Amino acid sequence: MRALQYTTIGEAPRVMEVPDPDPGPGQVLLQVTAAGVCHSDEYVMGLSAEHYTMGLPLTLGHEGVGVVAALGDGATGFEIGDAVAVYGPWGCGTCRLCAQGKENYCQNAAVQGIRPPGLGSPGSMAEYMIVDSPRHLVPLGDLDPVKNVSLTDAGLTPYHAIKISLPKLGAGSTAVCIGTGGLGHVGIQILKAISGAQVIALDVADDKLELARHVGADHALLSNGDAPAAVHEITGGRGADAVFDFVGIQPTVELAGRMVGTEGDVSIVGIGGGKLPVGFAAIAYDAAVRVPYWGSRLELMEVLELARRGQIGVETETFSLEEGPEAYERLHAGKIRGRAVILPNG
């Protein structure tokens, strides 16, 4: 079969011929319908040889949906032909957090060498993929697989971050989204769907701000040094009740710290490497700073239900498997509107 693989440190991914996978005991074989392209992939492929630990070659793709093609011995809960979404943050399934469905925070994954698909295990950018357990599948039902594949990360990740801050986002509150691309434009919709907050969107590009307005942002501002004053003016001097930084580089993290109000939340979702100093007089009184990661399996079910009700949707551009390297080039250049989706089987 064909797979889009990262084969050499520092080089672009390539389409390779690899052996067809066979499901082992307890595993599920999927014929992949769609696979999402993510900045996390870019981050991984940008690591130096010294810091890269995921093995080569690596089949990319941690956002995936498909149809059950075969079941390994003992795999139950699904039938051949079922349309499913892959829950990406695989864990041990037995620790205290996994027992709550929070495999994104598994306490044993690192020690046991458990890796998510596309981030250590073979991912979804292939004609077929192996899912290690049926518990890492969620029924897709009648949802369009291409339009909704990115919800497995670009929906789940902001949803998880926003749910943590929901007690602070009632009527009359304000939420700020920094970055309105792949994650941010979905985050805006989630905020409008499940909170009472007005939403202020920040980005550096006019087309991204137009997208933010299109999906429901109440205000769309350029992400620059003037933004904190504008946020304080919009909020009557209070500052934001929650700031979600979907970029995470040092300048955006610093902006988040300047915009959050007393008892507000700063969630650094993007993996740009920025760090926010916390201490007396460094940030608003009693503000909390969090670094959420992905989300639980139950939260993925909830995200898909929001999509099923028409409350959220993902702007997508599609690419064939052969066009995968081009999709990453355009992502790096900031030329993807919303999310890029690869169709490994056409």
Image (cartoon, rainbow, N blue to C red):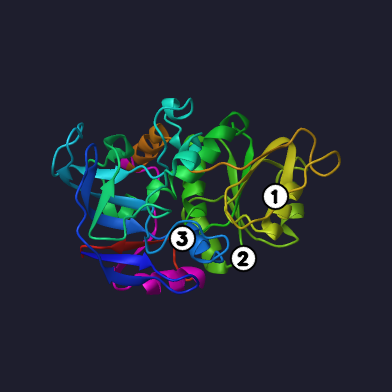
- Tell me: 337 left or right of 138: right
- Tell me: 340 left or right of 254: left
Q: Is residue 292 above or below residue 224?
A: above
Alpha-carbon neighbours of circle 2 within 10 Å: few (<14), some, or many (≥20)?
some
Mark 1–mark 3 distance (CA, rounded to whole Å): 25 Å
Count the marks. 3
Quarter holding residue 324: bottom left
Q: Residue at x 58, y 68 (%)?
A: 205
Name which of mark 1 and mark 2 comes first in the sequence: 2
Q: Residue at x 26, y 49 (%)?
A: 130
Q: Which residue is mark 2?
A: 204
Q: Are marks 1 and 3 in contact (CB under 8 Å)?
A: no
Alpha-carbon neighbours of circle 3 within 10 Å: few (<14), some, or many (≥20)?
some
Name which of mark 2 and mark 3 comes first in the sequence: 3
| Picture coordinates of residue 112, whole percent (x, y) | 44, 39
Q: Residue at x 39, y 48 (%)?
A: 151
Amino acid type of the residue that numbered disc 2 sits on in the rendered structure: Val
Tag 1's secondary structure? helix
Q: Is residue 204 above or below residue 176?
A: below
Q: Which residue is mark 1?
A: 256
Q: Is residue 192 visible?
A: no
Amino acid type of the residue that numbered disc 1 sits on in the rendered structure: Ala
- What segment is highlighted magenta in the picture? 308-333
Mark 2–mark 3 distance (CA, rounded to whole Å): 22 Å
Q: Is residue 208 visible?
A: yes
Q: Which residue is mark 3?
A: 41
Q: Is residue 146 above or below residue 104?
A: below
Name which of mark 1 and mark 3 comes first in the sequence: 3
